[in-house]
Amino acid sequence: MLLCMTTDPRSPRRAPAGAAVLREDVTDAIRAAVFEELAAVGFARMSIEGIARRAGVGKTAVYRRWKSKLSLVLDLVSAFAAQGLPAPATGSLYGDVRALLEVAARALRHPVASQVIPDLLVESARNPEISDAIKAALLDGQRGVAALIVREAVARGELPESTDPDRALDVIVGPLYWRLVVVRGGLPEGYLDEVARGAVAALRA
C-alpha cells in the first residue's frame, strides 16, 4: 500500500534533496544584515556567525548562498554597481553636474554607506578582489554617467569635443568624495552649488 501511494502519479512530488529553492526573503535579510554588520564592526571583524545572528538565520543559510564573507561582500558590491546611477537630463551642463552631485551626496551620506565605504576602501588596499569590486561600484558606473553628461554638453555646444569624461568625473565628484569619505565632514549650505559652478568653470577652461 505504501508503495502504491508513493508511486501514484496523482500524488504531489517531493523536491529532490539539495534542490530546494533558496527563499528570497531570507537572502534579502542576509544582505541587509551584511550592511549592518559592516557598519557596526567593519570587514576585518565581520563574521558569518555575526551576519547569521543579525539576520535571524543559521550559518548554513548563509553558506548555502555564499562560500565566505569575502564572496558575500563582493556580491553585494557588484549588485550595487549593477544598479548604477540615474543619468541626469536637465538640459544644461550645470544642471546635469548639480544633479549628479546631489545623487552622489545622498548615497555617500546614507548612514550605512558612510560607515561601509571607508572601511572597504581600506580593505581594498590589501585585497585586489575588493579593490576591483569597489572600482566597479564607485567608479565604472559614475564614469558612464560622466561620459553621457560630457557627450550631451558637447552636442549643445557647452563643452569642446576634446573634453575628457574621466577628467570631468574627477573634477565633478572629487571634492565630494574628499569631503564625505576622506575628511568625513558635513556639507555646508550651498556647498553642492559651489562645487557644481566650480566644476563647470573648470571643464570650460
Image: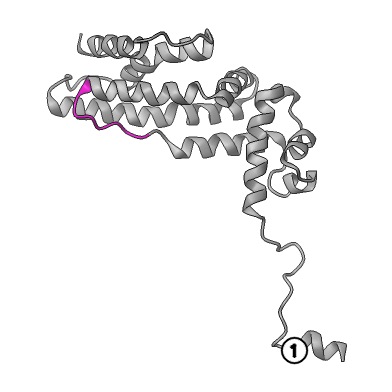
Is 56 left or right of 174, judged from the image as shown? right
Q: Does 110 appear in magenta?
A: no
Q: Is residue 79 above or below residue 182?
A: below
Question: Could you tell me residue 4's position as x and y percent?
Answer: 81, 91
Label 1 CA crowd tier, 10 Å (few <14, some 14–19, many 20+): few
Q: Is residue 101 above or below residue 10?
A: above
**Region of the chain picked out in magenta, as a range:** 86-93
Reading the image, the residue beneath label 1 is 8
Quadrant placement of the C terminus: top left
Q: Does 90 appear in magenta?
A: yes
- Which residue ends up furthest to the front in the rendered image? 189
Q: Nearer the viewer, residue 103 or 200?
A: 103
What secondary structure is the stretch in magenta mostly built from? loop
Q: Residue visible at 41% across and 8% down? A: 188
Report the amino acid beneath label 1.
Asp
Q: Residue visible at 74% across and 36% down? A: 54
Question: Could you tell me residue 146's position as x and y percent?
Answer: 32, 26
- Quarter of the view holding residue 189: top left
Is 118 left or right of 199, judged from the image as shown? right
- Which residue ends up furthest to the left in the rendered image? 157
Quadrant placement of the N terminus: bottom right
Question: Could you tell me residue 151's position as x and y percent?
Answer: 22, 29
- Which residue ends up furthest to the right in the rendered image? 1
- Quarter of the view holding residue 87: top left
Q: Is residue 22 above or below residue 39?
A: below
Q: Residue visible at 44% across and 26% down? A: 139
**Labels in figure, total:** 1
Q: Is residue 62 above or below residue 144?
A: below
Helix, strand or loop at label 1? It is loop
Q: Residue visible at 60% across and 26% down? A: 128
